[in-house]
Amino acid sequence: MEAVQCFCTFSHKKLSKLKPKPGSPTTPKPPLNITPQPRQKELPEVFRRFDSDCDGKISAVELRSYFASIGEYMSYEDAQAVISYLDSDNDGLLDFEDFLRLMEDNGGGRQGRRI
């Protein structure tokens, strides 16, 4: 559980930059960096902790719920902004590949880095 709790922290300043401007096209996302092997083995378990309904996708509600479970507040709008920024297939949800991008954007899940 400790590994899960340290994976993501978001700052409101960074989130405000993630919100797409009205009428602007979606910016292509950079390719994923390779996560070090020990972390890579932990990520499926971390993903399952976020994916509370086990459908293989993380919704804004699930993202908020996870953060609430560790004592962090995240507004629906902020959760939606994170998903919009990372969602590669535009279905409004994060699949495992999108989640890996989240972990890469967050420094591989190291504590102290903020997205």
Image (tube, grey):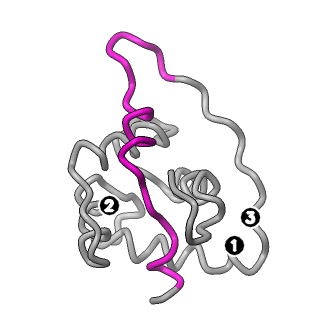
Q: Residue 35 carries which label?
A: 3
Image label count: 3
- Crowding at dot 1, Cα within 10 Å, few <14 / some 14-19 / many 20+, comes out as some
Q: Which of marks 2 and 1 is nearer the N terminus?
A: 1
SS class of the residue under badge 1? helix
Q: Residue 40 carries which label?
A: 1
**Quarter of the figure with residue 67:** bottom left
For label 2, the residue is 63
Left or right of 77? Residue 31 is: right
**Quarter of the figure with residue 49:** bottom left
Amino acid type, residue under disc 3 in the picture? Thr
The residues bearing labels 1 and 3 have C-alpha atoms spaced at a distance of 6 Å
SS class of the residue under badge 2? helix
Q: Are circles 1 and 3 on residues that touch, CB within 8 Å?
A: yes
SS class of the residue under badge 3? loop
Q: Is residue 16 above or below residue 52?
A: above
Tell me the residue at 49%/22% (across/down): 26
Q: Where is residue 47 in the image (x, y as percent from the top left)?
A: 47, 70
Amino acid type, residue under disc 2 in the picture? Leu
The span picked out in magenta is 3-26
What quarter of the picture does the N terminus occupy? bottom left
